[in-house]
Amino acid sequence: MRNCLRPDARSIPMAVPYTGGILAGQGLLVGAFFGVAAADAAQNTLVECETRGEFELPKEPALAITQGARVFWDNTHRRITTTASGNYEVGLCTVTAAGTDPTVRVMLARVPAAGA
């Protein structure tokens, strides 16, 4: 097909929306796209971002997250939470994280509504 631009796309370039930029391995949200930066980048510059895969990301402090739980991106604090309201769903927790853990392992995926 001549119209297939990226048949195996796992990443896309995204403009960094955050003051101070972003570091490689940090999550970022642009519109409805969530990805993990592949490199350091300044605000308003393009950075290649992985949109699929499993990543270790910072989580809300003192929050325990069980394996299989739906997880959301808190764009204000730039971390993972289990609170859906006001946040953007990014995937599922792959390994249970204790409240004392600073990070959680997340499989990036759009998860269908329960029962779908």
Image (spheres, rainbow, N blue to C red):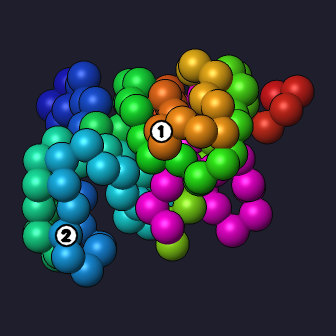
Residue 108: percent from left, percent from top: 48, 33
Which residue is depicted at the point 66% across and 39% down?
Answer: 99
In the rendered structure, find residue 90 and report the number of the disc placed on it. none
Image quarter (top left, top right, bottom left or bottom right) of the C terminus:
top right
Q: Earlier in the sequence, mark 1 or mark 2?
A: 2
Residue 20: percent from left, percent from top: 20, 76
Report the span colored magenta: 77-93
What is the quadrant of residue 45 in the picture? bottom left
61 left or right of 32 in image: right
Within 10 Å of disc 2 (Cα), the crowding (few <14, some 14-19, many 20+) is some
Residue 106: percent from left, percent from top: 50, 31
Residue 39: percent from left, percent from top: 11, 47
Q: Residue furthest bottom?
A: 19
Which residue is identified by label 1?
Answer: 103
9 left or right of 63 in image: left
Circle 2: residue type: Gly
Which residue is depicted at the point 39% across and 30% down?
Answer: 55
Image quarter (top left, top right, bottom left or bottom right) of the N terminus:
top left
Given residues 38 and 1, the one toward you in this image is 38
Which residue is identified by label 2?
Answer: 21
Residue 68 magenta-highlighted: no
Q: Nearer the viewer, mark 1 or mark 2?
A: 1
Q: Is residue 3 visible?
A: no
Q: Is residue 26 visible?
A: yes
Circle 1: residue type: Thr
**Could you say whether the residue bearing mark 2 is in a helix, strand or loop?**
loop
